[in-house]
Amino acid sequence: MTKNIGTIDRAVRIFGGLLCIAYAIPLGFPQTGWNWTGWIGVVPIVTAFVGFCPAYRIFGLSTSRPRR
């Protein structure tokens, strides 16, 4: 697996993932019955730490800098 996620992309994924998980836990968000969907935030956090996004590979995208 070649890394295809850059530094800024990683930061955005971690922030967004934590925000989604906060919605799931309800820290400051109202209980709506749909809070379980916030656990989807685990996916961007995992891809940020691994540095690889399978969807980017399918679509031929990369936000990381090429190696020299």
Image: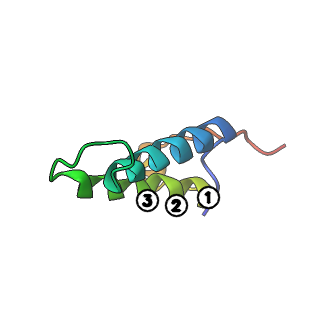
CA gap, disc 2 to disc 3?
A: 6 Å
Which residue has dot 3 on it? 42
Front-lying residue, 51 or 45: 45
Secondary-structure class at tag 1: helix
Q: Where is residue 40 in the image (x, y as percent from the top left)?
A: 34, 56
Residue at (60% x, 48% y) in the render: 4
Residue at (61% x, 41% y) in the render: 11
Instruction: Name the kind of residue labelled 3 in the image.
Output: Val
Which residue has dot 1 on it? 49
Residue at (34% x, 58% y) in the render: 39
The answer to the question of whether label 2 and label 3 lie on touching residues, with beta carbons closer than 8 A, is: yes
Neighbours of disc 2 within 10 Å: few (<14), some (14-19), many (20+): some
Sequence-first tag of 1 and 3: 3
Neighbours of disc 3 within 10 Å: few (<14), some (14-19), many (20+): some
What's the mark number on residue 1? none
The answer to the question of whether label 2 and label 1 lie on touching residues, with beta carbons closer than 8 A, is: yes
Front label number (1 vs 3):
3
What's the mark number on residue 46? 2
